[in-house]
Amino acid sequence: MTARSEPLTVPAILLRKTEYGESDLILTLLSPDHGRLSVIAKAAKKSRRRFSGVLEVFTELEAVVQHGRGLPRLQEASLKNAFARIREHPLRTGYAGLWAELAHDGAAEELPQGDLYGLLRFALQELDRGELAAELLHLAYLMRLLTLLGHAPCLECCVRCRTPAEKLSARDLRVDLGRGGVCCLRCAEGKEGEPVMALSRGTAKQLLWVGRADAARLSRLKTSPLGLAEGRDFLERFLVVHFGRLPRSLQVLRQLRDGEDLRR
Ligand SMILES: [Zn+2]
């Protein structure tokens, strides 16, 4: 028998929680140094005292993990940030849930993921603080996530003929989702059977900017509801193509958004 190694203490954000058997939970964590990490929390469903309130999706915690045979075990977890103000709003909870799911799908296992961790933490902290509009943070998160994963949308020029976007008339920008960015009207017309989606030049420019600005600059950005909605529709369609599926929490988020629109 090999000697058990020392338990590992890691900062982490909980990305996914699955019930396992009568009383256990399998958790997927994102940690800056160890990337995506699946652990089992024994008797977590019964022993409320041990993990009380800590094991919720998108909480930030400090986890003590014991490696051994099989799945590493979560020995202890202490809460660092529950992001309680996010959880007061269903729609914000929907955004945070989607961001966690996308981080889950994009994170590498057992490899340093400091940038991804930093991005998710930044987005959750700002959403919790509530000073920036959730819709704007959503665009910032998606742009940065796609860039980190090597799928940044091409917004500066036509993905086919490489004509710079500023040389095209403002009405001539179309989207080629398969090729990963905007294209000019002429290139878009040559393609058969593809749904044509337009994107205004202003929105394309704003997305590039939103993908880089810090929180202070984001807070000074003048946005229109229409521009935000256009950027969002584009990025959400884009990520479905590049992740190869419709994330479950994106469906949930869309239902929540439709509900909000009805109440307006
Ligand atoms: Zn073109």
Image (spheres, rainbow, N blue to C red):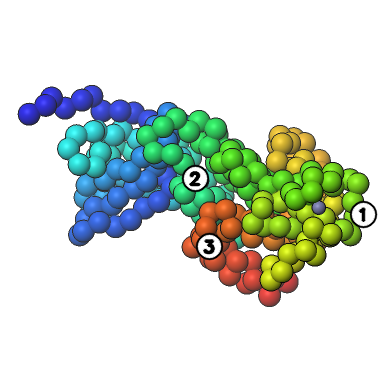
Residue toward you, 67 or 130: 67
Q: Which residue is mark 2?
A: 106
Residue 163 visible (yes or no): yes
Using the numbered discs, state the Cα–Cα distance from disc 1 to disc 3 in whole angstroms.
32 Å
Q: Say which element carries label 1.
A: loop
Q: Which residue is mark 1?
A: 169
The answer to which image quadrant residue 170 occupies is bottom right
Q: Say which element carries label 3.
A: loop
Residue depth check, mark 1 versus mark 3: number of the one nearer the observer: 1
Residue 58 visible (yes or no): no
Residue type, label 3:
Leu
Residue type, label 1:
Ser
Q: Say which residue appears at 68% left-offset and 75% top-offset.
A: 262
Residue furthest to the bottom in view is 262
Residue 104 in percent (x, y) is at 45, 47
Note whether 223 is above or below 226 in the view shown.
Answer: above
Q: Say which residue appears at 72% left-offset and 46% top-offset.
A: 154
Disc tally is 3
Residue 72 in percent (x, y) is at 25, 38
Disc 2 within 8 angstroms of ligand 1 (CB): no
Q: Earlier in the sequence, mark 1 or mark 3?
A: 1
Using the numbered discs, state the Cα–Cα distance from disc 3 to disc 2 in whole angstroms.
14 Å
